Image (cartoon, rainbow, N blue to C red):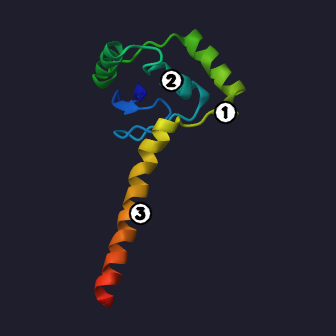
């Protein structure tokens, strides 16, 4: 699991490239993507991320290393076509949907069975 911090509201989220469940922010620009990746456990340990999150939630800005963000943004732009959500994040999003569909199908089958019998 990748722990990340929303660059807008400071809430924790799973995956740097996923939308924030609190404020809905989804990084789209290469700069926002670079900042979101920077505020993940790929660059900071959990304790440091929690301190950064507290700072953002309290309304203080986080001072990004602008040179590092610019370099990462250029790297993302150059390789931007290969950006995709990690498998773990895809599973976290789609597993509940699949389970709900299977449960709905089972319920429909049960109703049909009970009505026929």
Label annotation for residue 37 = 2
Residue situated furthest bottom in the rendering: 116
Give the spatial CA distance, label 3 vs label 1: 30 Å
- In the rendered image, which residue does mark 3 sit on? 101
Image: 69 above or below 8: above
The answer to which of 108 and 75 lies nearer the viewer is 108
Q: Residues within 10 Å of mark 2 (few under 14, many from 20)?
A: many
Residue drawn at the location 40% of the way across and 37% of the way down: 20
Quick one: quadrant of the C terminus? bottom left
**Image side of residue 10 versus residue 81, left or right:** left
Quick one: quadrant of the N terminus? top left
Q: Earlier in the sequence, mark 2 or mark 1?
A: 2
SS type, badge 2: helix
- In the rendered image, which residue does mark 1 sit on? 82
Instruction: Answer yes or no: is residue 21 visible.
Output: yes
Q: Earlier in the sequence, mark 3 or mark 2?
A: 2
């Amino acid at each position: 699991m990748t722990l990340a911090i929303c660059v807008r509201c400071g809430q924790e989220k799973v995956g740097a490239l996923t939308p924030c469940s609190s404020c809905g922010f989804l990084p789209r620009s290469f700069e926002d993507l670079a900042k979101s990746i920077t505020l993940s456990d790929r660059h900071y340990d959990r304790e440091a991320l929690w301190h950064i999150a507290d700072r953002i939630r309290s309304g203080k800005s986080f001072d990004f290393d602008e040179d590092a963000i610019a370099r990462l943004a250029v790297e993302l732009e150059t390789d931007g076509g290969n950006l995709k959500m990690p498998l773990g994040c895809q599973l976290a999003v789609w597993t509940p949907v699949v389970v709900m569909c299977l449960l709905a199908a089972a319920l429909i089958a049960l109703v049909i069975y009970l009505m026929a019998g």
